[in-house]
Amino acid sequence: MSEVSPGTPGELPDGPLPKVRSGIRGLDEITGGGLPQGRATLVSGGVGCGKTLFGVEFLVRGAEQFGEPGVLMTFEESPAELVQNVRSLGFDLKRLIAEKRVSLHYVHIDRREIEETGEYDLEGLFVRLNYAIDAIGAKRVMLDTIESIFSGFDNAAILRAELRRLFRWLKDKGVTTVITAEAEGGSLSRHGLEEFLSDCVIRLDRRVSDEVATRRLEIVKYRGSPHGTNEYPFLIDEGGISILPITSIGLQHPVSTERVSTGIPALDQMLGGRGPYRGSSVLVSGTAGTGKTSIAGQMVHAACARGERCLYFAFEEAPEQIIRNLRSIGNDLQPWRDTGMLLFQAARPTLHGLETHLAQIHKCVEEFQPSLVVLDPITNFIMSGSQVQVKAMLIRLIDYLKSRQITGLFTSLVGGDDPVEQSEAGVSSLIDTWILLRFLESNGERNRALYILKSRGMPHSNQVREMLMTESGVELTDVYLGSGGVLTGSARYVQEARERAEALRFRQELDAQERELLRQQRDVERQIETLQADLQARRDRFERLRAHEGQRHAVGLEDRSELARLRHDPAGTTDGRVEPQPSRQVEAP
Amino acid sequence: MNAADDLLNTDDLELEPLVWDLRLYVAGQTPKCLTAFANLKRLCEEHLEGRYSIEVIDLLQNPQLAEGDQILAIPTLVRRLPNPLRKVIGDLSNEERVLVGLDLRPR
């Protein structure tokens, strides 16, 4: 038979405080490894803040993940109730009990059937606990609201002394214990259990502000161990508890030099030619209807096409609506959704408190492991918290995403009258790349203009571009910058048409001039031809004349010799006169 | 009028012999447990002579029995019969309180 009295104290420990991993998501991070091993942890909280669940998860995780059987001793709920209550959170206590990895004990005290007389102690409780622990070799114990025994007995002094002894005994037994207590007023427990349980005290809290409830967890005390001192939001859902640690203590997250395309070539061009850095935070802000979601859609499409997973938190529109609307500009996200590359999470920001949202985003990111996370829009969170809270939440979210090298795309709705640069929930300093969309109003039109307000670590365009929604997606065109300022929309078209007409007119004039020149050239050439022909004619006539002259000379000589011969003729038939020979040559025309 | 008076009346009339089934839970031979047993024995002899049985259960020997009667405090006296179940905890040093607890005296 096992020894009930406290065992011998162990040797003096060396090294850091040994811890057991609780298995509760997030808790082991903020406690630096888990709960103190072999010691008792007080979990305190008001009604309905998840104390019992905390303890049950501690046992179930221990049994399932760390091979540490656990004893659950409940003083309030009956075993049947308890098993049923935690089943909805994914814990199959019934199976674990059947497998002897968890044992469940119900301590019930009916005040009406008990009379007290004289001295007593709670050795019966010790015996039961000891028996239960030894029966399955338990390493973990949970006592669910042990303070209930105060309502079962009159002598509080005995109970307090006995509880002190119990906690001491549990420590000596070497089991890691979670003890729940109901917080009341300002104290952690009704009967001052925190006096005895000084190793580790965790406070759970459920606060309602603006009709939205948020659960929070705080490590009030952790003797011998550094621990996070903040209030951490936590969630209870079908997977149990998830605590959201603030991971941004160090700003030591790795940074990437890889660039990711936005899916809009012209926008990439504006962002140093290659788009934003992977793991950076991109803010797209603008007034209503400027196309924030359209840009987000393009980025999502581009990421999915690269084979990266995208998580899209829609806080304003239903996923179906987003898909339908993006389809109208030629961006069909449905196939990505079907293949599981894209996951939509839609919820109104007012559905939960900020912390719950944050915790839920964390959880989703953990599960889905995306490369791109879209929050569309972040501004609505202001409805569910103050500016300071929203900023704090976004800081944590951005840091969290950065630490995981996840590109974050946030859209932000700017009110029409707000100064654009300051209304971004105060997050501008956290944003790496800030794309601003706005309407330019002129000539009775509103046209979308896009410019880069800032983009850290890259040469980015300082140009204002006009954003066009076409059937093949978002396109950017240069705006007309002239003496009349920035022209967009039809004014830009008019201006461009005017320029085109001008150019056309000029070209036509040039053509006419050219034709005229050619004509003149032809005229001159023709004149030259005529003159040359004339010249040639003159030259020919001259040549003829010269030839004629030669001939005449020759004929003259001939005639003279004939004359001379005739003069020697005695019969002399001539009177000495010589008739010239008619010329045989024909005058040239 | 209450059940205790009825019981005592029938007892006086001796219409039926009623055996009181009592259990005393102890944990080892501690002074408290020994005192409790002595007090119980004396009290039964005075008030229930020949109509009682006492079973002493040492939880150190049979720890599994603690659960059945929901024993936390030691020593605990359990009246299993007659119904309803009654428990008196402590060393039973205050006789009046014990008699009240066992419904041998009106509350």
Image (cartoon, helix red, strand yellow):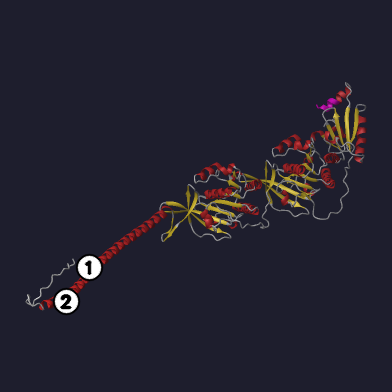
Mark 2 or mark 1, earlier in chain: 1
Is residue A77 among the parts visible in the rendering? Answer: no
Magenta residues span B1-7
- Classify residue A329 as left or right of residue A541: right
> Is A501 rendered above or below residue A157?
below
- Classify residue B29 as left or right of residue A538: right
The tag on residue B84 is none
Q: For residue B64, which quarter of the picture?
A: top right
The residue mark sitting in front, 2 or 1, is: 2
Q: Residues within 10 Å of mark 2 (few under 14, many from 20)?
A: few
- Classify residue A107 as left or right of residue A302: right
Q: Which residue is label 1 attached to?
A: A537
Q: Chain of mark 2?
A: A
Task: Give x and y (percent) for residue A207.
Answer: 66, 46
Report the amino acid beneath label 2: Leu
Q: Nearer the viewer, residue A187 or A501?
A: A501
Task: Give x and y (percent) for residue A413.
Answer: 53, 50
Q: Which residue is label 2 attached to?
A: A557
Q: Are marks 2 and 1 on the same chain?
A: yes
Q: Chain of mark 1?
A: A
Report the amino acid beneath label 1: Ala
Q: For residue A183, which quarter of the picture?
A: top right
> Is A414 rendered above or below residue A127?
below
User: Magenta includes B6?
Assistant: yes
In 3D space, how far apart are the residues under numbered discs 2 and 1 (Cα atoms)? Answer: 31 Å
